[in-house]
């Protein structure tokens, strides 16, 4: 019988190796900082190498361990090479955060074929390829692992105002999470997802401007959350304390799905 601390709630990631996609800005950059602050060595992956270099320098200066790895989420060879680079630098990747995403913000019938291919490529094909590559290496090494896929509340609700394909890919990510959690459970690889609502990030800045800015009177709590408010969920899903949690999809939307009601 394993002895557990009281409470069994450690978020210590010392000795762990993480790979975060879309790490050049927004949620991805925050995820990378949080994982590094808890002791993980972090491979920062995205296309914008200059931003990755700056973030890696920041993390390393603060006493963490980070490496900038230029990666194209639509290029299979680039993604497989990124995993190999991270492993060569830090050891087997045992935390994968599939964060890179691409909005479409267009009506379905107006999308070009190139845009369709890119949205599906970045939002679904890329996470699938990376997950399989990381899992393959974990299984070969006989090591457990944690994967966190970033879905969206668009998986649960789409209002018909554009970005239908984005919603479809985020539902696919939720289904991928469930399916891979079952396939890799015997290897102690936990696969979970976070489904954020609207959060402040570079990707959503334009949308917030169109909707009236932040504070946001159109949502229940009159605010748009910031990436820092997702830290605890990310850490829960990658830390030792959640060893029995796999196939979960955790929605974080600050009540945005609720109708705005007048208070009596």
Image: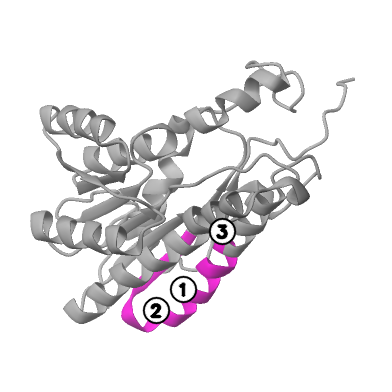
Query: Which secondary structure is most common in the magenta stretch?
Result: helix
Q: Residues within 10 Å of mark 2 (few under 14, many from 20)?
A: some
Q: Which numbered circle lies on residue 184?
A: 2
What's the CA distance linking mark 1 and mark 3?
11 Å
Residue 112 appears left or right of 44:
right
The residue shown at (10%, 60%) is 88
Was residue 127 drawn as part of the magenta stretch in this picture?
A: no
Residue 55, percent from left and from top: 24, 31
Is the Cβ of the residue at disc 1 closer than 8 Å to that at disc 2?
yes
Mark 3, secondary structure of its residue: strand
Q: Is residue 180 above or below residue 238?
A: below
Residue 259 appears left or right of 124:
right
The residue shown at (17%, 56%) is 86
Residue 22, percent from left and from top: 38, 43
Mark 1, secondary structure of its residue: helix
Question: Which residues fall within the magenta stretch?
Answer: 173-192
Disc on the earlier residue, 3 or 2: 2
Was residue 181 drawn as part of the magenta stretch in this picture?
A: yes
Q: Which numbered circle lies on residue 181?
A: 1
Q: Which numbered circle lies on residue 249?
A: 3
The residue shown at (21%, 28%) is 54
The residue shown at (23%, 73%) is 137
Using the rendered image of the protein, determine whether residue 61 is visible from the camera's viewpoint. Answer: yes
Q: How many marks?
A: 3
């Amino acid at each position: 019988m394993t002895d557990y601390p009281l409470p069994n709630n450690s978020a210590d990631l010392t000795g762990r190796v993480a790979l975060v996609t879309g790490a050049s800005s927004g949620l991805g950059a925050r995820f990378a900082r949080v994982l590094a602050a808890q002791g993980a060595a972090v491979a920062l992956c995205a296309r914008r190498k200059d931003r990755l270099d700056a973030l890696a320098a920041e993390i390393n200066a603060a006493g963490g361990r980070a490496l900038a790895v230029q990666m194209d989420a639509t290029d299979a060879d680039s993604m497989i090479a990124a995993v190999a680079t991270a492993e060569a630098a830090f050891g087997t990747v045992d935390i994968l955060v599939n964060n890179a995403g691409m909005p479409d913000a267009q009506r379905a019938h107006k999308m070009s074929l190139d845009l369709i291919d890119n949205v599906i490529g970045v939002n679904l094909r890329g996470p699938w390829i990376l997950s399989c590559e990381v899992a393959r290496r974990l299984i070969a090494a006989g090591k457990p692992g944690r994967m966190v896929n970033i879905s969206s509340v668009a998986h649960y609700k789409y209002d018909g105002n554009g970005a239908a394909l984005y919603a479809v890919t985020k539902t696919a990510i939720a289904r991928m999470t469930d399916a891979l959690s079952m396939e890799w459970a015997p290897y102690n690889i936990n696969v979970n997802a976070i489904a954020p609502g609207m959060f402040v990030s570079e990707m959503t800045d334009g949308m917030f401007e169109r909707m009236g800015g932040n504070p946001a009177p159109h949502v229940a709590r009159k605010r748009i959350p910031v990436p820092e408010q997702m830290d605890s969920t990310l850490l829960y899903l990658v830390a030792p304390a959640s060893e029995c949690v796999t196939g979960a999809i955790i929605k974080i939307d600050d009540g945005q799905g609720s109708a705005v009601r007048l208070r009596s």
